[in-house]
Amino acid sequence: MSYHAVVIAGFGGQGVMLAGQIIAMAAVIEGKNATWLPSYGPEMRGGTANCTVIVDEKPINSPVVDHPTEVIAMNFPSMMKFGPRLKHRGILFVNSSIVEHVLERDDVETVKVPANEIAEELGNTKAANMVMLGAFLEVTKAVSFEAVREALSEKITRKDLLEIDLMALDRGREYIKKSHSRSS
Protein backbone atom coordinates (compact mmCIF):
# COMPACT_ATOMS: atom_id res chain seq x y z
CA MET A 1 0.00 0.00 0.00
CA SER A 2 1.44 3.34 -0.96
CA TYR A 3 -1.08 5.43 1.04
CA HIS A 4 -0.55 5.76 4.78
CA ALA A 5 -2.48 8.09 7.07
CA VAL A 6 -1.00 7.58 10.53
CA VAL A 7 -1.89 9.21 13.81
CA ILE A 8 0.93 9.19 16.37
CA ALA A 9 -0.29 10.09 19.85
CA GLY A 10 0.93 10.20 23.43
CA PHE A 11 1.79 12.49 26.31
CA GLY A 12 3.75 15.63 25.55
CA GLY A 13 7.44 14.81 25.89
CA GLN A 14 7.13 11.29 24.42
CA GLY A 15 8.49 12.43 21.06
CA VAL A 16 5.36 11.88 18.99
CA MET A 17 5.91 15.09 17.01
CA LEU A 18 9.49 14.14 16.16
CA ALA A 19 8.44 10.65 15.05
CA GLY A 20 5.84 12.19 12.74
CA GLN A 21 8.29 14.72 11.33
CA ILE A 22 10.79 11.96 10.62
CA ILE A 23 8.22 9.91 8.68
CA ALA A 24 7.21 12.97 6.63
CA MET A 25 10.85 13.97 5.97
CA ALA A 26 11.72 10.40 4.94
CA ALA A 27 8.78 10.34 2.52
CA VAL A 28 9.98 13.58 0.90
CA ILE A 29 13.53 12.19 0.68
CA GLU A 30 12.05 9.24 -1.25
CA GLY A 31 10.18 11.58 -3.60
CA LYS A 32 6.76 10.86 -2.13
CA ASN A 33 4.15 13.39 -1.04
CA ALA A 34 3.74 13.95 2.69
CA THR A 35 1.89 16.11 5.18
CA TRP A 36 2.53 16.51 8.92
CA LEU A 37 -0.20 18.07 11.05
CA PRO A 38 0.61 18.58 14.76
CA SER A 39 -1.98 18.93 17.53
CA TYR A 40 -1.18 19.77 21.14
CA GLY A 41 -3.27 19.57 24.28
CA PRO A 42 -3.50 22.65 26.52
CA GLU A 43 -0.33 21.65 28.39
CA MET A 44 2.86 21.10 26.43
CA ARG A 45 4.84 18.63 28.53
CA GLY A 46 2.75 15.91 30.14
CA GLY A 47 -0.42 16.91 28.27
CA THR A 48 -1.64 15.10 25.21
CA ALA A 49 0.07 15.53 21.89
CA ASN A 50 -0.59 13.95 18.53
CA CYS A 51 0.19 14.43 14.90
CA THR A 52 -1.20 13.09 11.68
CA VAL A 53 1.18 12.12 8.90
CA ILE A 54 0.03 11.25 5.41
CA VAL A 55 2.38 9.59 2.94
CA ASP A 56 1.23 8.96 -0.61
CA GLU A 57 2.55 8.60 -4.13
CA LYS A 58 -0.31 10.84 -5.33
CA PRO A 59 -0.94 14.48 -4.35
CA ILE A 60 -2.55 14.86 -0.91
CA ASN A 61 -5.77 16.87 -0.85
CA SER A 62 -6.03 17.50 2.90
CA PRO A 63 -3.82 16.89 5.95
CA VAL A 64 -6.95 16.04 7.99
CA VAL A 65 -7.83 12.37 8.44
CA ASP A 66 -11.01 11.01 9.99
CA HIS A 67 -10.08 7.32 9.74
CA PRO A 68 -6.32 6.67 9.86
CA THR A 69 -4.80 3.55 8.29
CA GLU A 70 -2.47 3.22 11.30
CA VAL A 71 -2.43 4.54 14.87
CA ILE A 72 0.67 4.58 17.05
CA ALA A 73 -0.54 4.93 20.65
CA MET A 74 2.22 5.71 23.14
CA ASN A 75 -0.23 5.67 26.08
CA PHE A 76 -3.70 4.44 27.09
CA PRO A 77 -5.65 7.72 26.61
CA SER A 78 -4.24 8.00 23.07
CA MET A 79 -5.28 4.45 22.24
CA MET A 80 -8.79 5.09 23.58
CA LYS A 81 -9.11 8.35 21.65
CA PHE A 82 -7.72 7.28 18.26
CA GLY A 83 -8.14 3.48 18.25
CA PRO A 84 -11.89 3.63 17.59
CA ARG A 85 -11.27 5.92 14.59
CA LEU A 86 -8.86 3.46 13.00
CA LYS A 87 -9.93 2.37 9.53
CA HIS A 88 -11.32 -1.17 9.07
CA ARG A 89 -8.31 -3.47 8.54
CA GLY A 90 -6.01 -0.79 9.95
CA ILE A 91 -3.10 -1.41 12.28
CA LEU A 92 -2.98 -0.31 15.92
CA PHE A 93 0.55 -0.03 17.35
CA VAL A 94 0.49 0.03 21.14
CA ASN A 95 3.29 0.85 23.59
CA SER A 96 2.69 -2.22 25.75
CA SER A 97 5.11 -0.88 28.39
CA ILE A 98 2.40 1.59 29.42
CA VAL A 99 -0.82 0.24 27.90
CA GLU A 100 -1.98 -2.89 29.72
CA HIS A 101 -5.48 -3.32 28.28
CA VAL A 102 -5.66 -3.15 24.51
CA LEU A 103 -8.68 -1.86 22.63
CA GLU A 104 -10.87 -4.78 21.56
CA ARG A 105 -11.46 -4.58 17.82
CA ASP A 106 -11.50 -7.73 15.74
CA ASP A 107 -11.37 -5.82 12.44
CA VAL A 108 -7.90 -4.34 13.00
CA GLU A 109 -4.44 -5.75 13.60
CA THR A 110 -2.87 -4.93 16.96
CA VAL A 111 0.91 -4.78 17.31
CA LYS A 112 2.17 -4.59 20.89
CA VAL A 113 5.67 -3.21 21.40
CA PRO A 114 7.30 -2.81 24.85
CA ALA A 115 8.88 0.45 23.69
CA ASN A 116 9.82 1.83 27.11
CA GLU A 117 11.58 -1.39 28.19
CA ILE A 118 13.53 -1.57 24.94
CA ALA A 119 14.51 2.12 25.19
CA GLU A 120 15.52 1.60 28.83
CA GLU A 121 17.83 -1.26 27.78
CA LEU A 122 19.53 1.27 25.47
CA GLY A 123 19.95 3.66 28.40
CA ASN A 124 17.48 6.35 27.31
CA THR A 125 13.72 5.99 27.90
CA LYS A 126 13.12 9.00 25.64
CA ALA A 127 14.04 6.78 22.68
CA ALA A 128 10.76 4.83 23.06
CA ASN A 129 9.34 6.88 20.17
CA MET A 130 12.08 5.60 17.88
CA VAL A 131 11.48 2.02 19.02
CA MET A 132 7.83 2.43 18.01
CA LEU A 133 8.86 4.07 14.75
CA GLY A 134 11.13 1.12 13.93
CA ALA A 135 8.28 -1.31 14.62
CA PHE A 136 5.88 0.78 12.51
CA LEU A 137 8.32 0.84 9.58
CA GLU A 138 8.99 -2.89 9.73
CA VAL A 139 5.26 -3.69 9.61
CA THR A 140 4.03 -1.05 7.14
CA LYS A 141 7.05 -0.30 4.91
CA ALA A 142 5.54 3.24 4.62
CA VAL A 143 9.02 4.64 4.03
CA SER A 144 12.43 2.99 3.93
CA PHE A 145 14.75 2.67 6.90
CA GLU A 146 17.47 4.32 4.82
CA ALA A 147 15.33 7.43 4.27
CA VAL A 148 14.42 7.51 7.98
CA ARG A 149 18.09 7.28 8.96
CA GLU A 150 18.85 10.17 6.59
CA ALA A 151 15.97 12.24 8.01
CA LEU A 152 17.10 11.52 11.58
CA SER A 153 20.66 12.55 10.71
CA GLU A 154 19.34 15.87 9.39
CA LYS A 155 17.01 16.48 12.36
CA ILE A 156 19.12 15.29 15.31
CA THR A 157 22.37 17.23 15.51
CA ARG A 158 23.75 15.77 18.76
CA LYS A 159 25.79 12.71 17.82
CA ASP A 160 25.10 10.87 21.11
CA LEU A 161 21.33 11.29 20.75
CA LEU A 162 21.43 10.34 17.08
CA GLU A 163 23.29 7.11 17.92
CA ILE A 164 20.69 6.12 20.53
CA ASP A 165 17.80 7.00 18.21
CA LEU A 166 19.29 4.91 15.40
CA MET A 167 19.84 1.97 17.77
CA ALA A 168 16.26 2.33 19.06
CA LEU A 169 14.95 2.35 15.49
CA ASP A 170 16.82 -0.89 14.78
CA ARG A 171 15.65 -2.47 18.04
CA GLY A 172 12.01 -1.73 17.18
CA ARG A 173 12.53 -3.31 13.79
CA GLU A 174 14.23 -6.36 15.30
CA TYR A 175 11.50 -6.75 17.91
CA ILE A 176 8.90 -7.11 15.14
CA LYS A 177 11.07 -9.55 13.19
CA LYS A 178 11.47 -11.77 16.29
CA SER A 179 8.05 -11.23 17.82
CA HIS A 180 5.21 -13.63 17.45
CA SER A 181 2.85 -11.40 19.41
CA ARG A 182 1.33 -9.83 16.27
CA SER A 183 -2.35 -10.62 16.16
CA SER A 184 -4.89 -10.04 13.44
Image (cartoon, rainbow, N blue to C red):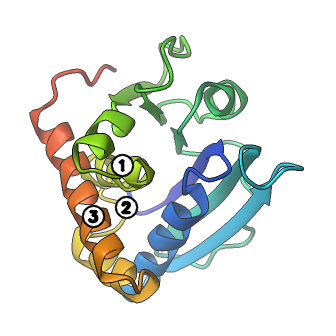
Identify the residue at horizontal 67%, vertical 24% (top origin): 80
Across and down, in percent, residue 39 comes to 78, 57
Residue nearest the viewer, comparing 138 with 48: 48
Q: CA distance from mark 2 to mark 1?
A: 8 Å
Which of the marked residues, 2 or 3, is nearer the chain's N terminus? 2
In the picture of the structure, the residue carrying the numbered disc 3 is 164
Front of the two marks 2 and 1: 1
Q: Crowding near pointer 2: few (<14 within 10 Å), some, many (20+)? A: many
Across and down, in percent, residue 154 comes to 40, 88
Residue at the left extreme?
Answer: 178
Q: CA distance from mark 2 to mark 3?
A: 22 Å
**Secondary structure under badge 2?**
loop
Front of the two marks 2 and 3: 3
Q: Crowding near pointer 1: few (<14 within 10 Å), some, many (20+)? A: many
In the picture of the structure, the residue carrying the numbered disc 1 is 136
**Secondary structure under badge 1?**
helix
In the picture of the structure, the residue carrying the numbered disc 2 is 142
Identify the residue at horizontal 33%, vertical 49% (top origin): 131
Q: Is residue 11 above or below residue 1?
A: above
Identify the residue at horizontal 66%, vertical 57% (top origin): 51
Identify the residue at horizontal 89%, vertical 50% (top origin): 42
Q: In the shown orientation, is residue 51 left or right of residue 152?
A: right
- Amino acid residing under circle 3: Ile
Do the numbered discs 2 and 3 sit on residues whose CB atoms are within 8 Å? no
Can you see residue 30? no
**Secondary structure under badge 3?**
helix
Q: Is residue 125 above or below residue 88?
A: below
Do the numbered discs 2 and 1 sit on residues whose CB atoms are within 8 Å? yes
Which of the marked residues, 2 or 1, is nearer the chain's N terminus? 1
